[in-house]
Amino acid sequence: QVQLVESGGGSVQAGGSLRLSCVASGYTSNPNCMGWFRQAPGKEREGVAALYTVDHSTYYSDSVKGRFTISLDDAKNTLYLQMNSLKPEDTAMYYCAAPRQNYYSTCRKSDGMDYWGKGTLVTISS
């Protein structure tokens, strides 16, 4: 059974930084990608960053490009999201997600993901 467990959320002032972590367990081989999504109150869930496990190439949404960095520590089975220059509009529940093994996903949209963590809350004050 695949499990994804996020941590690292919290409350910081605008301009600050946070690093989210997601520990993955239960995979017998890497999924083709993993991603970070967020959902703010009253808004749809959006994909903010994705990492492709074959070469660790990355994707970022325009809203976070240049401020967020996604990375993967293969040895620790841990996905990270380093978030810098945080803005109040980054306030949301952040989720780690991944597709099932041997299934191709872009990891950019929710419907391409099979496994989700429970989320970690990020609150940015102005």
Image: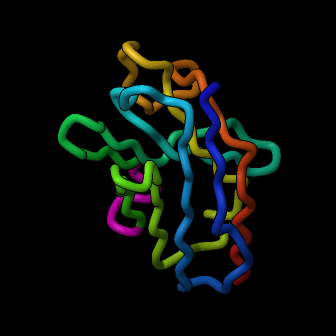
Q: Is residue 104 above or below residue 121?
A: above
45 to the left or right of 99: right
Q: Please, what is the dominant secondary structure of the magenta stretch? A: loop
Farthest right residue? 42
Q: Quadrant of residue 11?
A: bottom right
Quadrant location of the C terminus? bottom right
Quadrant location of the N terminus? top right
Q: Is residue 65 above or below residue 77?
A: below
Farthest left residue? 55
In magenta segment, residue 26: no
Q: Which residues are magenta?
A: 61-67
Q: Is residue 112 above or below residue 92?
A: above
113 vs 72, nearest the viewer: 72
Q: Quadrant of residue 91?
A: bottom right
Determine the residue positioned at 37% across, 49% down: 60
In magenta segment, residue 64: yes
Determine the residue positioned at 66% across, 71% down: 88
Determine the residue positioned at 69% across, 75% down: 124
Residue 99 place in picture, x, y as percent: 49, 24
Q: Quadrant of residue 113?
A: top right
54 to the left or right of 23: left
Callout count = 0
